[in-house]
Image (cartoon, rainbow, N blue to C red):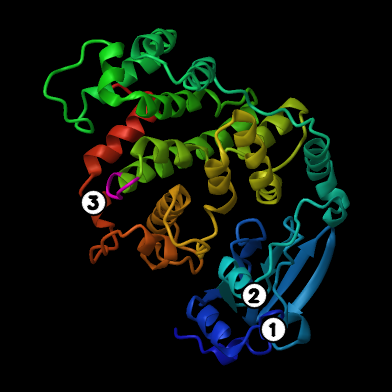
Amino acid sequence: MHLFSSALDDLSPLHELDTDQRARLAATGQVVSIPAGRRLLATQEYPWLLYLLSGQLCLIYAGQKTLITAGKPRACQPIFNEQQLLAQAVLTSDSEVLRLDRALYHRLSGRRYTDLTSVDTLNETEGALFGQLVQACQAGQLQLPTLPKVARAIQEAMQDPDISSARLARIVQVDPAITGALIRMANSVLCQGLQPIPDVRNAIIRLGLEVTRSTVMSLAMQQVFKTKSPLMKAHMKAVWNRSVHVSALSYVIARHCPRFSPEQAMLAGLVHDVGVIPIIDHISRHEIQVDENEVEAAVIRLGQLVGELVVNYWGLGPEVVEIVRHSGDWYRDDREEPDYCDIVLVARLYRLNQSEVRGPLPRYDAVPAYYKLGLVFPTRDGTLDVIAEAKEELNFVIDMLRGKKQ
């Protein structure tokens, strides 16, 4: 269904945009028919601005119920307030809902995202979890994950300009799993060596010091995505699997882009969502009773902020901070030259385009990052050529990061 920009004229705060901006936003719109009885959660719908076009729903938040009817003044406002992440809506009749890209709206309006970390925005229900997390962040008391021993040793060793492959080999050999993975990588199709590599020192020589550093850091990350809480294990596993897929896609994309290190892109993709780890750890450590929706709301509110704290704590540098901060800003176009954030952004969108069916997400080949990277146009089925041609590489990286022996 084609949506005319005039349909947005009376919607708040969209009426503040000019005509061309509303037309661009309308082009991303999606009108969805939803049957009576269906429940919508603010956390799941957060990437989009939702408006009720026809029908009726009941908005439930903080124990209060509000009836919203299409055509009435309240229907001209988004169904979910950006602050009320624990809200839900139940459709009381067959209805039509308009979904618009929230990230694009913020980019067009020039507004920064509302400060979701302010304690003032929390209600009593949210306060038990969000308040503790916010206060822990502000007081510097949130327990951040430490780099695994081998990754920390590699980081420190690489600060020596005279570091040798023999010294790196001695550090890596402390971890047999990483040692084996490095040797397999040096012998894989990714490196295209003529002679098989028998030991880790020669693997490091073939890979190079910087490639070894990024690869060891990535391989060690699996030790960080852990939780002792049985209730949180499924959530942490889902975050790890998602991060691995984005990491492997970033690796493959970087191999087809000049001036980029695939291994550095792999590490960038793996840590882009690292802010989830301390949040889950805090919930587990303090035995806070929360449901899945509350965990998702905490991640939306604080994931980026905590992620920046983690990568700064690890000393991964400003470029990785930029990735944590902006790899979900689909319309990011603040600099002429492409960077690793562009690679991770395209990788994330590619994965979402392949797996998500709800909401008007932009196509991965229709965002500024894609064009800046100089990637080829996708095939008819929407598969990115460079990824379709690199299935073996993609699977190798995924298995390597998951610790599987090829």
Q: CA distance from mark 3 to mark 2?
A: 36 Å
Q: Are marks 2 and 1 in contact (CB under 8 Å)?
A: yes
240 horizontally vs 126: left or right: left
What residue is disc 1 on? 16
Judge the density around disc 1: few (<14), some (14-19), many (≥20) Cα neighbours within 10 Å.
few
The residue segment tinted magenta is 255-259
The tag earlier along the polypeptide, 3 or 2, is 2
Above or below for 89 versus 133: below
Res. 277 image quadrant:
top right
Above or below for 1 versus 159: below
Q: CA distance from mark 3 to mark 1?
A: 42 Å
Pair 3/2: label in front: 2
Residue furthest left as drawn: 194
Report helix, strand or loop for mark 1: helix
Res. 204 image quadrant:
top left
Q: Which residue is depicted at the point 51% across and 16% down?
A: 153
Query: Magenta stretch: residue 278 in it?
Result: no
How many numbered tags mark residues here?
A: 3
x, y (%) of residue 171? 44, 10
Front residue (pair 38, 335): 335
Q: Are marks 3 and 2 in contact (CB under 8 Å)?
A: no
Q: Are marks 3 and 1 in contact (CB under 8 Å)?
A: no
313 horizontally vs 161: left or right: right
Residue type pointed to by label 1:
Glu
Residue type pointed to by label 3:
Ala
What residue is disc 3 on? 388
x, y (%) of residue 241? 46, 37
Front residue (pair 170, 296): 170
Q: Which residue is depicted at the point 85% across and 50% down?
A: 119
What residue is disc 2 on? 109
Query: Magenta stretch: residue 257 in it?
Result: yes
Report helix, strand or loop for mark 3: helix
